[in-house]
Image: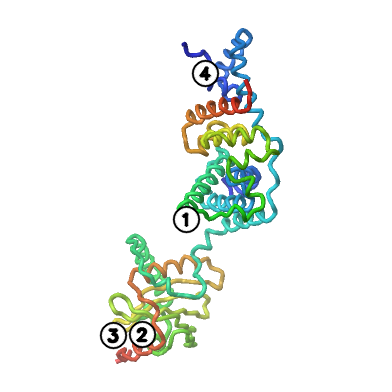
Amino acid sequence: MGSSEFDTALLAALPKVRRYALSLCRKPDIADDLVQTTVERAVIARDRFDLATSMQAWLFRILRNAWIDQTRRNATRGTEVDIHDSPDAAIHDGDRAMAAHMALKETEIALATLPQDQQDVLRLVCFEELSYAEAAEVLDIPKGTVMSRLARARIALAEKMGIN
Amino acid sequence: MTEPAFSDEILMAFADGELDDSTAEALLAALPGDPALAKRLDLFLTTREALAPQAPPEPVPDALLAQVQATLAASRTDNVVPFARPPAAPAPRWQPMALAASIALAVGLGAGFWASGLSQRGPGATAQADLLGVPGLDEALASMASGEARDLGTASVTVVASFVTQDQQLCREVEIADPSGADLLAVLCHDAKQWQTRLVLATAARDGASYTPASALETLDVFLGAVGAGAPMSPEAEAQALGQLPSGRE
């Protein structure tokens, strides 16, 4: 793939990549750092990107791995992020606080109470509108696992939201 | 209890537009006569709709966009940048390199450059009479301090550094610029009798010929590693080592 073609595809996917970063880490400054890290890793690996596949899914995968690396490092280093250093951190930090924030949509509250692996597939397929195959690539799990997990998540979400 | 004809995953795939055509047709045919099936399908349609994005993503902040564009731009020129000599601090260049393959490559390249350097510069000239085709170079090597430049008439010579190899040979890295256009970077070592050319690299071609200085410098690094080059000598150590050399022309 030509270098300008790669750049164009990357820039086109950037708003969604940043939205996904925000959904993972919930703080704009950390999200932007994560997006930049993702781009740096992407350009290093640019020769391995296949034009026939989705740039968005490819970047999501890099971003998610970068986020996992980062949270793992933070975990071994102890709590480095002070929730008081960001005025809106309190409402973003953790499921309970999120649920307590009454302005949040009912769906988001219900989503936040689901197990993390179910949240992941719901967000990627229903919100980010990736295909099952793309979500499988991002999460590095088989497509069949995406489908069974997503079906369970949808049923659980419907129960919490009082659908059916 | 029997397995339903249409599993949750089939219904979900239909709601998400991922069901194959023949199964989708079968499902559509079954739906009108099966309210329970329709209700199960509705769950997947409703949850999909509930989570669908309400708006397109926000535009990327200018600062982030600028940073990303700089990263992309830098990556387009990366194929020449990594080999560039780092500014100042020559020390890391002298680290012995562990990779046997790199060493073999460097020795091979070095020999090639060496041969071409000699043939370019002085067919028939003996190495000692006119090192690299530059009369007076041997005396300059024996007397000049690192950092010093001297015009030898046919070329100007700058001594970059001195070091000792793992075989305890004193070596000097020199830059040679001659009026014919090409600049050379050379390493010459003293074998206790005379100076020997060990490596010659074309580092620039002012006439526009297409040498690649960056990779020449990388080759130098690998060469220095291959001969076990020690750290560049201090001026004092260098002066002492030069003073101990036997006189060049006995």
- Tell me the mark number nearer the camera, choosing from 2 and 3: 3
- Tell me the mark number nearer the camera, choosing from 4 and 3: 4
- Tell me the mark number nearer the camera, choosing from 3 and 1: 1
Picture coordinates of residue B44, whole percent (x, y): 60, 23
Instruction: Choose between B119 and B171: the one closer to the eye.
Output: B171
Asked if residue B173 is positioned above or below residue A140 in the image, the reply reads below
Residue receiving disc 4: B7
CA distance separating discs 3 and 1? 60 Å
- Tell me the mark number nearer the camera, choosing from 1 and 2: 1
Residue receiving disc 3: B193
Tell which circle, 4 or 2, labels the residue nearer the N-terminal end: 4
- Tell me the mark number nearer the camera, choosing from 1 and 4: 1
Please tell me the numbered disc located at residue A77: 1
User: Crowding near pointer 1: few (<14 within 10 Å), some, many (20+)?
Assistant: few
Q: Amino acid at mark 4?
A: Ser
Q: Amino acid at mark 2?
A: Ala
Picture coordinates of residue B188, whole percent (x, y): 37, 79
Callout 1 secondary element: helix
Q: Residue at x 56, y 69 (%)?
A: B208
Residue receiving disc 2: B129
